[in-house]
Image (cartoon, rainbow, N blue to C red):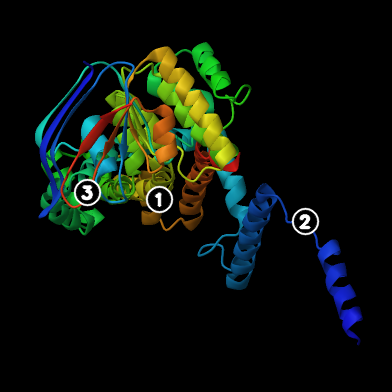
């Protein structure tokens, strides 16, 4: 093959290369592949008591939804996730900003952060139930305490990377504290906030489930506990997968559009 | 008098950057501050702006302050119009008028990243002028611009200073720029401040 032929082939490949799939299509195909993987595993195991396939689990999800039972427990868990998420994000953001902007406070508070980062979630949950009681407040506080240190650590990194000249500009033009926070600080923290929110939600709902498993009478974790005691794997999967679907919807319908809006200026 | 500066000493560690520096700038006056790199010109502006308060002496300034930095220092996530509105408190219409004044008509909706460097510099100037400052600090605002653009910006700055009459401190390396804008000139000399000031 001559050199010119090789060149022609290379050019031909460039022209004919397929356009990349849109991200929603990749997402759908990826989830479909996961479903196929599940079918294959269930088929290989061949025991619905241990691993039921989607053809068994999906009708049960529909029947639970039709009876209204599914919504009650999804709603209870989602409400706990929302409350714990709001508390952890706002307190973590505040602490992270303070620690990121004040080296002195950071020196004093950093050992605390390390201690709380390494406190096992289960210990916090048990202690909150023992100290506060088996109630809703204890559940929310336990989840929030588990999450605040991670949000603080991530926001501290964001605050440390804040742009100095923009801060100077805001000071020279005498921008109010609120205006600085909204137009100077938060836009710079947006990528950190988005990453923290995403990591936070996935962590928080898992901790909420443990809390419900241990000490609540309603919610996905409670139902999983109930069906675990009866060794009903299908129902455990019904509730777990339903809530995964809820979180996937939150990610797709709320978090991603918010993130896209925040990074509009980068793509302009 | 809008600006009184009486700096006895400004040090970074053991190094004296500024020493025994006393001057005043009246409304409508433009004081050019010249001198080699590292002599403390930008430090002087930071002290006047209140961005650095670690010095011995006294600086008194009255009224609104605006500054044009060496870099444009814009909020990249806000439109050109909002960069003016949010920092100076002007209305959207006033912001558009300020943009038109610096030749950025119709670009109010663009983000700074969509503007050329020259346009970003103009936007930075427009922000300072839109603030209608009583004290205007210019920190080498024309550095690294091509000569045509420098001329353009100088003319613009000249006309706005004539119109708004702020007390202006103008840090520059370029004698020609100082001669063009300044009513007085001051040369800072290393190591520690022999200061000469002359009337224009």
Report the side of A196 relative to A91 (left or right).
right
Which residue carries the number 1 mark?
Answer: A199
Q: Earlier in the sequence, mark 1 or mark 2?
A: 2
Q: Earlier in the sequence, mark 1 or mark 3?
A: 3
- Element under label 3? helix
Q: Position of residue A56 (x, y in %)?
A: 61, 54
Q: CA distance from mark 1 to mark 3?
A: 20 Å
Question: How many marks are shown on the rendered structure?
Answer: 3
* Dot 2 and dot 3 residues touching (CB under 8 Å): no
Local packing at callout 1 (Cα closer than 10 Å; few below 14, some 14-19, many 20+) is some
Q: Which mark is residue B190?
A: none
Quadrant placement of the N terminus of chain A: bottom right
Q: CA distance from mark 1 to mark 2?
A: 31 Å
Q: Quadrant of residue B99?
A: top right
Report the side of A126 relative to A188 (left or right).
left
Local packing at callout 3 (Cα closer than 10 Å; few below 14, some 14-19, many 20+) is many
Q: Position of residue A204 (x, y in %)?
A: 35, 46
Q: CA distance from mark 2 to mark 3?
A: 50 Å
Residue B154 visible in the snapshot: yes
Q: Quadrant of residue B71?
A: top left
Say which of B81 and B142 sits in front.
Answer: B142
Q: Position of residue B200 (x, y in %)?
A: 33, 26
Picture residue at 67% right of the left edge, 54% below the top: A26
- Element under label 2? loop
Determine the residue located farthest toward the bottom in the rendered image: A1
Q: Which mark is residue A19?
A: 2
Local packing at callout 2 (Cα closer than 10 Å; few below 14, some 14-19, many 20+) is few
Picture residue at 45% right of the left edge, 19% below the top: B160
Q: Chain of mark 3?
A: A
- Element under label 1? helix
């Amino acid at each position: 093959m001559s050199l010119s032929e090789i060149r022609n082939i290379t050019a031909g490949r460039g022209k004919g290369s397929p356009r990349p799939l849109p991200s929603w299509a990749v997402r759908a195909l990826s989830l479909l592949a996961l479903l196929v993987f599940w079918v294959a595993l269930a088929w290989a195991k061949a025991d619905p008591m241990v691993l039921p396939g989607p053809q068994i689990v999906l009708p049960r999800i529909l029947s639970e939804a039709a009876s209204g039972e599914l919504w009650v427990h999804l709603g209870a868990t989602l409400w706990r996730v929302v409350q714990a998420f709001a508390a952890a994000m706002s307190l973590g953001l505040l602490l992270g900003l303070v620690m990121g902007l004040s080296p002195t406070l950071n020196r004093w508070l950093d050992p605390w952060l390390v201690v709380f980062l390494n406190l096992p979630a289960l210990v916090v949950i048990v202690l909150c139930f023992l100290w506060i009681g088996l109630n809703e407040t204890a559940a929310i506080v336990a989840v929030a305490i588990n999450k605040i240190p991670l949000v603080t650590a991530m926001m501290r990194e964001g605050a440390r990377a804040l742009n100095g000249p923009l801060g100077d500009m805001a000071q020279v033009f005498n921008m109010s504290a609120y205006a600085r926070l909204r137009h100077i600080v938060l836009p710079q923290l947006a990528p950190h906030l988005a990453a923290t929110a995403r990591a936070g939600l996935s962590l928080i709902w898992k901790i909420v489930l443990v809390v419900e498993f241990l000490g609540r009478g309603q919610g996905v974790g409670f139902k999983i506990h109930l069906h675990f005691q009866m060794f009903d794997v299908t129902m455990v999967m019904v509730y777990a997968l339903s809530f995964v679907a809820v979180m996937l919807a939150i990610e797709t319908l709320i978090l991603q559009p918010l993130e896209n809006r925040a990074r509009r200026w980068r793509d302009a | 008098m809008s600006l009184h500066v009486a700096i006895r000493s400004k040090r970074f560690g053991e190094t004296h950057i500024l020493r025994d520096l006393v001057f005043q700038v009246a409304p409508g006056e433009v004081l050019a501050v010249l001198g080699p790199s590292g002599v403390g010109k930008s430090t002087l502006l930071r002290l006047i702006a209140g961005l650095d308060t670690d010095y011995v002496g006294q600086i008194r300034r009255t009224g609104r302050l605006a500054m044009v930095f060496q870099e444009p220092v814009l909020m990249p996530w806000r439109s050109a119009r909002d960069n003016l509105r949010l920092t100076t408190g002007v209305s959207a219409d006033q912001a558009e008028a300020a943009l038109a004044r610096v030749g950025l008509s119709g670009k109010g909706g663009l983000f700074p990243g969509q503007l050329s460097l020259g346009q970003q510099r103009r936007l930075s100037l427009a922000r300072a002028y839109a603030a209608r400052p009583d004290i205007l600090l210019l920190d080498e605002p024309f550095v690294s611009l091509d000569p045509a653009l420098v001329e353009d910006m100088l003319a613009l700055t000249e006309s706005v200073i004539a119109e708004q009459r702020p007390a202006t401190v103008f840090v520059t390396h370029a004698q020609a720029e100082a001669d063009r804008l300044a009513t007085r000139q001051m040369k800072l000399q290393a190591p520690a401040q022999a200061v000469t000031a002359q009337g224009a």
